Image (cartoon, grey):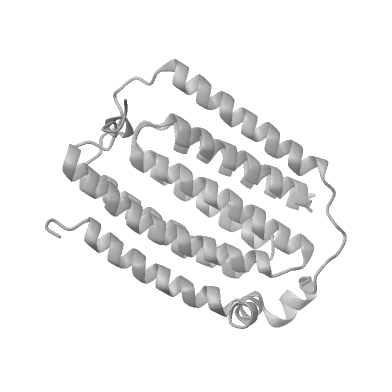
Amino acid sequence: MPALHDYLIVAAILFAIGAVGVLTRRNAIVIFMCIELMLNAVNLTFVAFSRYLGNIDGEIFVLFVMTVAACEAAVGLALMIAFYKNRESIDVEELNLMKW
Amino acid sequence: MPESIFFYSVATIAIISAICVITCKNPINSALSLVLTFFCLAVFYVMLHAPFLAAVQVMVYAGAIMVLIIFVIMLLNIQAETVKKSAHGVVLGGAIGFVILCETGYLLLSGAISESRGPIDLALIANIGHTELIGMAMFSDFLLPFEITSLLLLAAIIGAVVLAKKKV
């Protein structure tokens, strides 16, 4: 029977992997996928705590996180399409107009 | 004992596919690995006696968001990355990720879980059903955030349509 700590450690590892992906990759869509990975790690933490503390509030919050992630996916991908129309590339190194 | 083996194998698959997400050069391979990670997380939700959330996870994340991402990858025809990454950047990113992992691990393992438990236990979930429990909480205590979420979805729809138009 996995204890609460096991779920939390798996969630922490997934969050750290997502953070490394956001910091390392250059493709904007892959960065977005790593952000979704971090959100899912947080969802796993919420559901684990909700189960082990006998409260339903954690799972309600997971539903809201999923809704916000879906909205963010729609708007973020539309933004990337608009960016691609401008620059013909999806590389985040091209976002350098405000660099000194 | 077999539940521990099952948990560790699913956790290993989830972590390996998450590492594939951040290391694959082709973004389609990253997207498919992320779908596998989402399925592993849905298995975790079932093990945590939250089957409604497992179904919603598969439908929303693996079924809608990942399909949207693969649409956009194919629409923009994004090829595999050919530019060689700088070794300094990768090492620095890896170091920051390792620091995040150590901090989070320390915070998780150094605290003790408080013993105050709420009313939702396994008997109640088996009796009433998980979906009805979420419904009872969502439409009584969390009704206002639920309605605000509908406004957020409306704003997201309008924003997505406007941002991707040819002529505004």
Residue B48 placement: quadrant: bottom right
Q: Is residue B65 above or below residue B76?
A: below
Q: Is residue B156 above or below residue B110?
A: below
List the single residue furthest toward the right.
B115
List the single residue furthest toward the left.
B167
In the picture, the quarter occupied by the C terminus of chain A is top left
Question: Residue B2, can we see it?
Answer: no
Residue under the image location 21 percent in, 56 percent down: B164
Q: Is A51 on the left or on the right of A30, as rendered?
A: right
Residue B76 placement: quadrant: top left
Residue B122 place in picture, x, y as percent = 77, 71
Question: Residue B100, can we see it?
Answer: yes
- The foreground one among B21 and A79 is A79
Residue A43 place in picture, x, y as percent = 59, 56
Residue A44 place in picture, x, y as percent = 62, 54
- The foreground one among B29 and A94 is A94
Residue under the image location 62 percent in, 83 percent down: B140
Q: Is B103 on the left or on the right of B24, as rendered?
A: right
Residue under the image location 39 percent in, 69 percent down: B153
Residue A63 place in picture, x, y as percent = 55, 66
Residue under the image location 47 percent in, 35 percent down: A21
List the single residue furthest toward the front.
A100
Report how many numbered discs are placed on residues in the image: 0
